[in-house]
Amino acid sequence: MPTSPRTRPIEADHKALIFAASMIAKTFLMATVATQVFCGNVNPGTLFTCGPDAAYVGGSAAAIALMGIVFGRYVVRIKSFNKVFANMMKADLIVTGMYLAVAFTAPQLVATRVMIWLFGTWIFGMMLAPFNSERTTLKKITEYGSIAGLGAFFALHFVPGFAELQNAYTAGMIGTSILSVFGGGRVK
């Protein structure tokens, strides 16, 4: 009995390529924000005049790449991710794209928050994604609501009156990032 393209599972090689694309974007994002934090500017030429701090930028990017290699190896192979992989990665790539956009728009405002997200909290959402994967309506609301919430928290960076709420919306950014990938872990 032939399976439709919607129900056919993604092959392990293709999963690895999709996960690698996400990790390349995350590593590039880490190199960008680490350059802002350690060298004071996101201009690539700054990295060459940064001196000994350039090693911290390289180490930060290497740490993200290593986390992706180790975690990606298990995500691609664990059977509980098979049903939810496509939706989970869609949500992850949307969130990563949002972080990339804000990191280039206002790097001095969000660089440290992006580093917090990159040093492990994105993994929490992926680890939680397979749980309750059959509750599609609730998880769909969680995914799209969290993506909208993350966009709202990013928008707060550009409103001058919210500068005193930095810790509150940092927690909100991290929470909505985790919940959006968790919500993406649904069967359909």
Image (tube, rainbow, N blue to C red):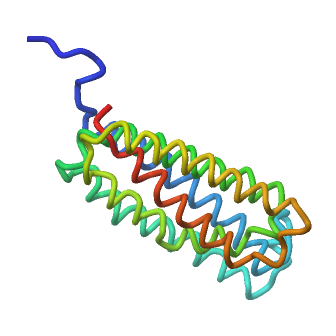
Q: At 29% from the left edge and 18% from the top edge, which residue is drawn? A: 5
Q: Picture coordinates of residue 175 (x, y %)?
A: 53, 65
Q: Quadrant of residue 166?
A: bottom right
User: Does residue 47 lie above or below 7 as drawn?
Assistant: below
Q: Picture coordinates of residue 110 (x, y %)?
A: 75, 68
Q: Residue furthest left?
A: 1
Q: At 47% from the left edge and 60% from the top edge, which residue is drawn? A: 178
Q: Picture coordinates of residue 50 (x, y %)?
A: 82, 80
User: Does residue 186 lie above or below 64 as drawn?
Assistant: above
User: Does residue 149 lie above or below 119 as drawn?
Assistant: above
Q: Quadrant of residue 128?
A: bottom left
Q: At 27% from the left edge and 51% from the top edge, which residue is drawn? A: 130
Instruction: Tell me: 17 left or right of 164.
Output: left
Instruction: Tell me: 42 left or right of 130.
Output: right
Position of the N terminus by quadrant: top left
Q: Picture coordinates of residue 53 (x, y %)?
A: 73, 85
Q: Residue furthest top?
A: 1
Instruction: Tell me: 76 left or right of 153.
Output: left
